Amino acid sequence: MFSTHAKRIAALGAACAMLFTAAACGGSSSSSQSDGQTIISVNNTEPQSPLVPADTNEMGGGKVIRYLFEGLVSYDVKGKQHLEVAKSITPNDDATQYTIKIKDGWKFTNGEAVTAESFAKAWSYAANVKHAMKQASRMSIIKGYDELQDPNVADDAQLSGLEVKDDHTLVVTLDHPDSVFPVQIAHQSFFPLPSVAYKDIKAFGKNPVGNGPYKLKSWNVGKDITVVKNPDYKGSRTVKNDGIEFRVYTDENAAYSDVLSGNLDVLDEVPASAVKTFRSNRSVTAYSQPGSSYQGFVIPERLDHFGFDEEGQLRRQAISMAINRKQIVEKVYSNTKTVATDFTSPLVPEYSKTLKGEENLEYNPTKAKELWKKADAISPWSGSFKIAYNADGGHKQWVDAVSNQLKNTLGIDAQGDAYPTFSDIRERVTDRSISTAFRSGWMLDYPSAEDYMTPLYASASADGHGSNDGDYKNPEFDADLANALSQTDVTKRTEALRTAQEILMQDLPSIPLWCDNVAAVSAQNVKNVQFDYTNMPTYNTITK
């Protein structure tokens, strides 16, 4: 899932200069004790879209959705899977069909029962091209997805691979073998929806009805979203507080200032101005541990000189080799990030430091100049190379550092291109109107390398059907990824994913920079802050 500030999980680069006063914060500085309840205040950005699980692919909305809904399975802070609404998930011999048994007694907060139909209808709605859901490609693994991409398909057309046997039994037939399916369904796009959602999906997204550990209390656009404990929740994520206030901040320094003054309980990403001091600051409780969020930038194939051809590949490799990642991580971020060695993160079992083509991620200014010169021999370069980023996410410092390195090594004009908010840049990226390179952050949705591979680089996720915003399409990569997912043997699957990654290493559809470690703070009176595999706090455990 796209991270708003460099996460999710995972958190992604932080920046900015001097600390602003508490008055500069985007959210309220009022007490989080309300009507005798303990409401935990946390940072967030304004969601790009209404809170519909399958139409949200960024963390402003994703943080909230994960706590308003519950799926078939979930994962705890140690990456262990828990059955939630699912009673059992049973595959056939070749992982092409799964029989899912649904537990009895689950209800949405409006009293409607959660049944097999609640999942089947939600997944089909997400897959149907008429509804233009941003996470539609997540359903491409289910039989019948391609038919639902026909622009003439009926609004209520259903995935042929879904068979509701009864209220408690859902049989899922896949388009191809997929041994990772029981892991993938932890993703929010597979959450169930109540029948009221289909009457007016946008209105529903502004006042969602879920089945998760919390329910929506209020949404003040541009200010905050408050959720309160759902007393009827039946899942494993025990709630230890009365609610969460997600405050919208447009500057991480303001959020950090609010934590220092006790006006914000938890900040999940420390700004660059504080990375050297937050661990020793006695005014806060600091958290620092390995993380899973990926940070890089995409150079769209549609840009002149950057097609997926020989010239474009040479230029991407040259740009990647011109970046001294280690220096930026040390000097700018005080080693609160881990230099990228592949397209995943150290928190997935398939992570690698020894991929074929790994030299493309190593700083080599001499080779970078050579490759750029070869590209110029094919078609001379002119103009300015820009990297777009959202100014509210703390990316300016690393974008400026990367731009300076490109300028000094390749002798080209390179600079950052700031958009005021995450929503602003995502709109341009989503409608393909952006005409520059742009930052790309990804927060792990479930603990598998596949979660980086399919959403970001598969052809099925391109052209607005998923999160492949550079519209990268390589049939060889698609085939290797499909081969990996067909492997029920973990060792064979890991090796096949490695082969697929080596294709990415040559093509560089995204330029990997680093993975964000957890670098977070909480106010001194806040307790039980934990971080899961996505780099995000487990909001339900926090107390004070």
Image: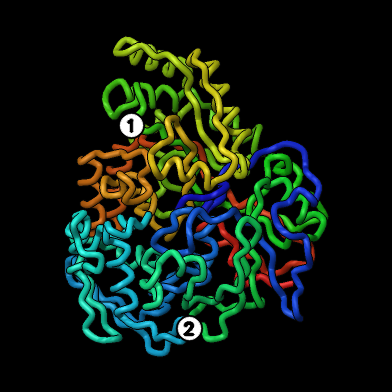
Give whichever of 253, 332 is nearer the camera.
Answer: 253
Q: Is residue 467 above or below residue 503?
A: below
**Kind of residue sitting beneath label 1:** Glu
Q: Dividing the picture into quarters, in which one does residue 228 lie?
A: bottom right
Whether residues under marks 1 and 2 lie with C-beta atoms below 8 angstroms apart, the answer is no
Q: Would residue 99 appear left or right of 454 to someone viewing this image?
A: left
Q: Residue at x 76, y 61 (%)?
A: 523
On the image, the x and y values in percent for residue 480 come to: 23, 46
Residue tagged 2: 110
Q: Would residue 436 appear left or right of 5 to someone viewing this image?
A: left
Q: Would residue 99 appear left or right of 375 to someone viewing this image?
A: left
Q: How many marks?
A: 2
Instruction: For label 1, count other residues whose C-alpha is less than 10 Å away and answer few (under 14), some (14-19) or many (20+).
Output: some
Give the quadrant of the C terminus.
bottom right
Which mark is on residue 301? 1
Q: Residue at x 25, y 56 (%)?
A: 485
Q: Residue at x 44, y 58 (%)?
A: 56
**Kind of residue sitting beneath label 2:** Asn
On the image, the x and y values in percent for residue 34 come to: 75, 75
Which mark is on residue 332? none
Q: Please, what secondary structure does the residue beneath circle 1 have?
A: loop
On the image, the x and y values in percent for residue 326 come to: 56, 32
Instruction: For label 2, count other residues whose C-alpha is less than 10 Å away and answer few (under 14), some (14-19) or many (20+).
Output: few
On the image, the x and y values in percent for residue 429 come to: 43, 41
